[in-house]
Image (cartoon, rainbow, N blue to C red):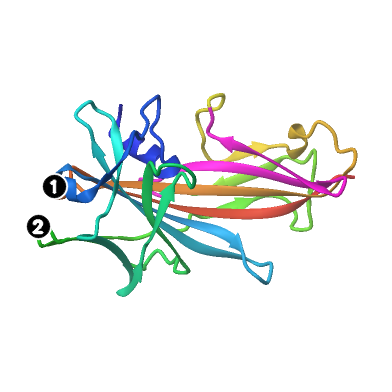
Amino acid sequence: MNKRLLLLCLGLSLHGCNGDNIEFLNSSNQLETSDIYMQIIADVRQRTNDQNESEDYTALQVNFMGQHRDGYFFSIELNDDDSVSASVDGAPSTLVKQVFPDRGDPMAVRYAQDYTTTDAAAVYSVVLDRERDAETHEVDFNLPEETPFSVSGEETGIELQEAVLVEWSPLADTDYDLRLAYSCEYDNDTINFHLHYPNPDEPELSSPFTFIPGDYLDSTEGLSDCTLTTSLTGSMYQEITDSAFAQQEILTSRRQAITRSLLLQ
């Protein structure tokens, strides 16, 4: 299996792909640095604040893994002699250990923190201090730039049978995915569903992308207050080739979203 693909799956779901699962949790004091796989994931996302306004933030997580002689990967928990921290433009912060699953015996650990800094010019740093070899391992990186991105239609709303045009100007060395998220009120409840591109049926995604919102609604009877959020995520991958680790990689992404009302009548 491609190690980049495996580590990506580990980072996102904390389980391996195609039958490769994390089998157990191990302590970092049992491994040399050259036997450790280090993965850094930094995603610029959006959330709703207390004022019910959308705001961007950066979700950072760091994963450490080892590889058993039989080939499968396992998650690594830092022992008391090892510590990992992060900083943004020189301002230090603590990463919080998160154990998975929440119930039962832990099988995976990640170290995470959220930040309000989303500027592509900001310098993020992750530092691993290892007392066993009296070494400090530091890596710096930046977040992806914003991608020029637009969705056609009036800001007051989009007709169900109106052809919607999504356009973006791709950045170099960046992979993209597109998500169409529908949300409607129905019988005092909220119904949500989404479509994701590329997918097995449509493996290629390019700009411009055109769709008709009504094509994905079987019926509008009883629906009200419908919205459509079109989000574009640009992702970048970097492998540190001169690393002291078995493998060290950085996965960064930026999600941009535009929300419009759907005109049902």
The outermost residue toward the left is 133
Q: Amino acid at mark 2?
A: Asp
Asked whether residue 264 appears in the rendered view, the answer is yes
Q: Nearer the viewer, residue 236 or 157?
A: 236
SS under mark 1: loop
Q: Nearer the viewer, residue 209 or 81?
A: 81
Q: Quadrant of residue 164?
A: top right
Q: Is residue 229 above or below residue 194?
A: below
Q: Earlier in the sequence, mark 1 or mark 2?
A: 1
- Distance Cα–Cα, label 1 vs label 2: 9 Å
Where is residue 236 drawn, in percent x and y?
37, 48
Where is residue 258 drawn, in percent x and y?
64, 54
Where is residue 57 drawn, in percent x and y?
50, 63
37 to the left or right of 14:
left
Q: Quadrant of residue 18?
A: top left
Q: Is residue 11 magenta?
A: no
| Residue designated by label 1 | 32
247 to the left or right of 225:
left
Asked whether residue 126 appears in the rendered view, the answer is no
| Residue designated by label 2 | 133
Q: Quadrant of residue 121?
A: bottom left
Q: Amino acid at mark 1?
A: Glu
What's the magenta region? 170-199
Q: Is residue 146 above or below residue 169?
A: below
Contact check, label 1 and label 2, Cβ < 8 Å: yes
The outermost residue toward the front is 104
* Quadrant the N terminus occupies: top left
